[in-house]
Image (cartoon, grey):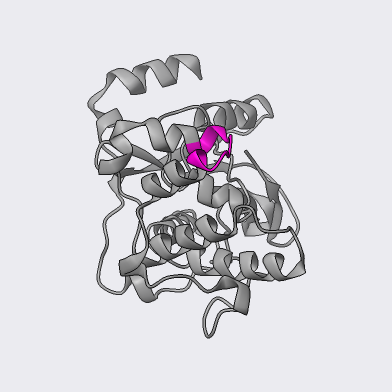
Amino acid sequence: MPEVRALYERSPLAARGRPVRRVPGDRHRKAATPGDEPAAGRPPPGARTLRPAAAPPPRATARHLLDSGTDDPALHSLAEHTAARHTVTGDDTVLAAYDFLRGHWHAPDDAELARAKAWWRGQLLAAWPLSVHGELAAELAARHGAEEGPVPWGVETRLDGGALVLLPHGPAPGGPARPLGPLLSFLDVPGSGGTDRWEWLSRQRNGGTALTGFSMLRAGRHDAGGVLWARHPGSGPNEHTGATG
């Protein structure tokens, strides 16, 4: 696997990958994780925020929380990374979710906050750009001849009787500032810590998997994660095997 990684990073392919661009209808597609419903309708009282147009950008939110005395590595990375101001962050849903984070970072971790976080998880996973990961996972499942099923973001999911493993994921931990990183972590989204695609592929290969690969998503020149896959013998119904990262 190290040789494959070195070859990949020296090739023009490393600068490509499928772009995370908005297409008509993206904002209205549903791809929420089961159990996070309701992802539509009126939010619970604790989930209300400013109008998206009035919400500050994620980088400003990170600076605000750091100035208030918060010491969080992900917020530091987002606030200090100059590329963050030019990085794709998402649509109005992401801005509104960051406003919720800004207003509830220091809130008591009670049942009301848990309900509000669950509502925002559903909203965020159904919104661009995270919805694109779900669409790509569905395409990969179809290419492998597997019946389409729910493939939650950040969760290893087995399809086709356990023979196909899919993992929609974000950028590797420790990489450049990830605009969605602090938000995913605050909302307790599975896999919010990021996934190192090369480590994951190596684990699959070392475990005896014959075929592995990945489809990468990019936001401009930034690695936006993508979907990892592994094909190996297995049995049993479609299932989720747990979060990674």
**Residue 137 sits inside the magenta stretch:** no
Q: What stretch is highlighted in magenta?
A: 66-75
| Residue 200 in sight from this viewpoint | yes
Near-viewer residue (107 or 28): 107
Q: Front-most of 20 and 237?
A: 20
Q: Quadrant of residue 79?
A: top left
Q: Residue at left 30%, top 47%? A: 18
Tell me where residue 112 appears, x and y as whole percent: 71, 71
User: Residue 114: x percent and y percent?
Assistant: 70, 65
Q: In this view, does 152 lie above or below 70?
A: below
Q: Quadrant of the C terminus?
A: top right
x and y percentages locating residue 15 in the rendered image: 25, 31
In this rendering, position of residue 115 left or right of residue 50: right
**Residue at 30% across / 74% down in the picture?**
25
Residue 90 locus on image (x, y percent)? 35, 57
Toward the viewer: 43 or 143?
Answer: 43
